[in-house]
Image (cartoon, coloured by chain):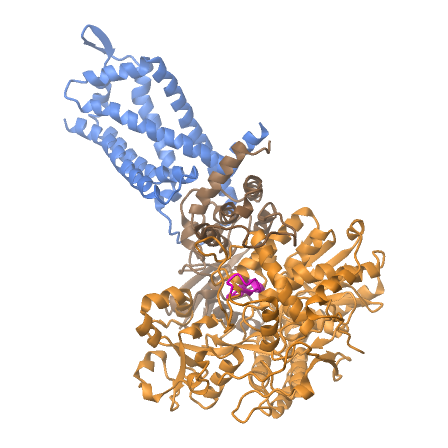
Amino acid sequence: MKLDSKIPEGPLAEKWSKHKFNLKLVNPANKRKYEIIVVGTGLAGASAAASLAELGYNVKAFCFQDSPRRAHSIAAQGGINAAKNYRNDGDSVYRLFYDTVKGGDYRAREGNVYRLAEVSVDIIDQCVAQGVPFAREYGGLLDNRSFGGAQVSRTFYARGQTGQQLLLGAYSALNRQIANGKVKMYNRTEMLDVVVSDGKARGIITRDLITGKIEAHSGHAVLLCTGGYGNVFFLSTNAKGSNVTAAWRAHKKGALFGNPCFTQIHPTCIPVSGDHQSKLTLMSESLRNDGRVWVPKVARPGLKAVDAAKIPEAERDYFLERKYPSFGNLVPRDVASRNAKYACDEGKGVGSGLAVFLDFADAIKRDGKKVIEAKYGNLFDMYQQITGDNPYEVPMMIFPAVHYTMGGLWVDYNLQTTVPGLYALGEANFSDHGANRLGASALMQGLADGYFVIPYTIGDYLANLGWSDKIGTDHPAFREALEGVNSRLNKLLSIKGKKTVDEFHRELGLTMWDYCGMSRTEEGLKKAKKKIQELRAEFWTNVNVLGSNNELNQELEKAGRVADFMELGELMVDDALNRSESCGGHFREESQTPDGEALRKDDEFAYVAAWEYKGDNQPEVLHKEELVFENVKLTQRSYK
Amino acid sequence: MNWFSNLLSSTLGRKLVMALTGLFLILFLAVHLAGNLQLLKNDEGQAFNIYAHFMTSNPLIKVISYVNYAFILLHIVWAIILTRRNRAARGPQGYAVSNNTSHWSSRNMGILGTFIALFLIIHLRGFWYEMHWGGIATANYDGVDYKNLYAVVDAAYSQWWYVTIYVVSMILLAFHLYHGFGSAFQTLGLNHVKYNPVIKFVGVAFAIIVPALFALIPIVMFLD
Amino acid sequence: MKITLKVWRQKSKEAKGEFKTYQLDHVSQDMSFLEMFDVLNNDLVKKGEDPVAFDHDCREGICGMCSMYINGRPHGPLQTTTCQLHMRSFKDGQTITVEPWRAKAFPIIKDLVVDRSSFDRIQQAGGYISVNTGGVPDANEIAIPKKDADAAFDAAACIQCGACVAACKNSSAMLFVSAKISQYALLPQGQPERKTRAENMVAQMDAEGFGACSNTLACEAECPKGISVTNIARMNREYYVSKLSSDNV
């Protein structure tokens, strides 16, 4: 298989407009003859479904939540980047492009990223027109802030709930099309397989989560907007329901999976409080603007936050300030996370041992409690609600947590996977963030794909396909997929073993976190691979899923998702093993500079690793898409 | 007129009717109280009887009083309709445990209103009916005969149980007004950061002072 | 700590429900309320009993999916979402009664899971601004006073959890609907469809079978996002003015 990224020829700044012109169009009168399936209703899915319906296509949209508005995009806090240069501070499309490529540690495609930066400005216009209440200044114009260490203020925000407001905007557009009858919405419905026939995506198989009914839906194209796979770690900042099933089913039907090992670990999360922990809560990284990160110089196991004040200044190690004097506590997410891990590895962790202090005592002394409260009041309240500690009086405890997955289904410039007619949008694809995502860029990408890319690129495929080229749900391909789904569900229900689904999931998560988390070694990864294989074998003989398929059965839902996570976990380990360099969120201990920083190997690894599924228990085959950098110069990051 | 019946049959429209009739009845209470206070004048009921005569004979007052009767009925009937709808909205199964944080009177306007309606029947039968159709003795002031309603009131208020009913009913009315006054403004959409405190203050003051003065009359007359 | 749980169990929409009592002996006060349910469910599965179905997703207080009526209050004793409630809010040995939201317009699907699709339908009736993707003016073309933008945001912060309905003795959805109507009524972008929107959303709210507002303010007291009843007054205004002045006969 040869991977064709379909990046248009020509100068960077003209690629997208030229490409748009070259794409075939579907006659307006014919659009209503096409049916498009959209799976997932987060930023990417809701915006795509609404935009395609506005164009005249018939859309069927699916979400497993009880309402499309609950997709996990809703939880994004910080903001959305756009190269509007409203602040006159030197921002431009090119600078946003440059920052994103560099921030991704040179593992993203130039062409895609430039397009992303280009359409970012349209996103803001679109959202404002929909009534998204972005923060404004007293003069009535939009406010911006600098985010995640960016040198310019290009982040638009709606308090700490930007994702919520953007999703509600897209959801309102979706609602309008549902009311118009152009979108048929299926809530509480989970996609369990993709149907491929003649090498093209033809539809999907779904399960109604209330009745258990398995249904086939046929369409001319299928869009997967199903988010990331951070829950493979069990503990992550993702929603409990976030899963990889749709993407993984597509992978098994022929879609290549790109850079699966690229995961982002966010440094400022609330630490695990016990074995009962079900998810991790992120706190905005803006906290590092005023909080100082430290651990005791001499290990003090079990040190509580209330006793932190007893440690004299001389016995504290402000390790980020010590190692990175110029950036200090504001080093990028991956660096901050890794160093917290090192401190805990040395036994200097506080609390449970897996936490470091984030101390506001100096900031409160310097600026007064009022100023700190105005800046972080809601975060402090949230922290106190969850932990019971008052951060105005004692230092916070933080620890890194899995937050975002840069990897995903491999797509070309048109967002099409290697299966024609099957598209992946938003976090579900691998395309724009390389090995590390910058703050406030996830919302941008989700909406760019849904509002401004797919409405153009899908037309080209559909026009070439023709509206009559569609198969009915009575086609053998559908029947075969239906049977596959049914037999898998029945298998899960019939095992009746001794362990619960959550127990398997926790075990998988722990293995992934220990060996394929913040820092990875060849030895550890090999161990992880073996462990996952054993766990997977045990799962299929010893999992206990009660109840039947004909009812709301949340254990059954989880079981199917965890089964897919286990297969994905193994692929992540394979990918991490293969990539024996350190880049972005992927840190291989074998590849460090003499002073312990990540060492990229551009000669060997400046490519996208796209994996092809070859059948159960067969090793996946690696395909490489070489990355060509014509506009930016590859440099090593330094924050010393 | 489809839109108009739509308006009136909507939940918001029904509340609008409740608020408007409620506010009118609040106004009526104030006027009624002003008249009744004349019972306490030390003139053997002369001022009150002249006032009562005026209220039953002036054509304009008559029209207003018919509007008043209609609004009382409307307020009651609409309340019943709304309550039934609200009951239905709750569904068949109620909560086993409930720790509602709202004010008791706000949740029990229907019960309060029912007792007030019962009181109204007793009240109307005792005085209003007597005044219109009962055989009341007359009193003569400056050569003109007036029905001596004062004597009827005085006789009624000399019975302790009658006074008790009045006082208890006024307490219930106070609670009804305590919620109803401010609630009517909220329903009408008259909610403004500048005027909310005024509405709240006047509402509470009205709910306490007006029923208290109403209750004071039978108490004083009983003690006399 | 030890906890006695009385949980509403109901097999399906049609089935008759009842309370079941469960004993939990090893509850940590650092657990969230939903994690306590995870522990219960894990134990139940181990014992071969049907685990309790409940809605939840983000577990960080923003998706609005979690919805438990705990000891007589939606989302329990604190003004927050169920997922943000922690066991330290309860006493050792306490009995906790957990029920689903109860309203005719929120039929029970199973155990503590209810169907809130009525909220989606209300928004489909007009909770949007009719603009197509692309072809919109520059974002800074319309200046919006900060005060208005902030007020619109306050209304838009609603997470659609339905606690307002659960708290209301009339199962009224007015806090939710008024927040939606308010967001658009406060913004210049919302003006062209302002009147029709108010009329249609209220009509749909009534058609779904929600009750009327008695201004008890219980909704505001329980709303995890602090949505103000000022919005209800605004909705009333919007609706009356629209009904009396729009062209919709």
Q: Colour of chain C?
A: brown
Establish if B1 lies above or below A104.
Answer: above
Q: Which chain is orange?
A: A
Question: Horizontally, is C6 left or right of C192 in the view?
Answer: left
Q: Colour of chain B?
A: blue
Check the image and name the residue furthest to the top.
B143
Establish if B26 lies above or below A427.
Answer: above
> Observer-nearest residue: A348 or B106?
A348
Quadrant assignment, res B166? top left
> Observer-nearest residue: C19 or A271?
A271
Establish if C90 lies above or below B72.
Answer: below
- Magenta part mainly helix, strand or loop? loop
Check the image and name the residue furthest to the bottom.
A594
Instruction: Tell me if residue A382 can be seen.
Output: yes
Magenta span covers which residues? A72-88
Quadrant that contains the N terminus of chain A: bottom right
> Observer-nearest residue: C43 or A26?
A26
Q: Is residue A79 magenta?
A: yes
Instruction: Tell me if residue C15 can be seen.
Output: no
Place of residue A431 in the rendered image (x, y in percent of width and height, measured from the top left): 67, 72
Quadrant assignment, res A193? bottom right
Place of residue B212 in the rendered image (x, y in percent of width and height, measured from the top left): 24, 34
Place of residue A583 in the rendered image (x, y in percent of width and height, measured from the top left): 60, 83
Question: Horizontally, is B64 left or right of A488 in the view?
Answer: left
Counting labels gives 0
Place of residue A639 in the rendered image (x, y in percent of width and height, measured from the top left): 50, 83
Q: Is residue A449 magenta?
A: no
Question: Horizontally, is A293 left or right of B126 in the view?
Answer: right
Establish if A313 lies above or below A395.
Answer: below
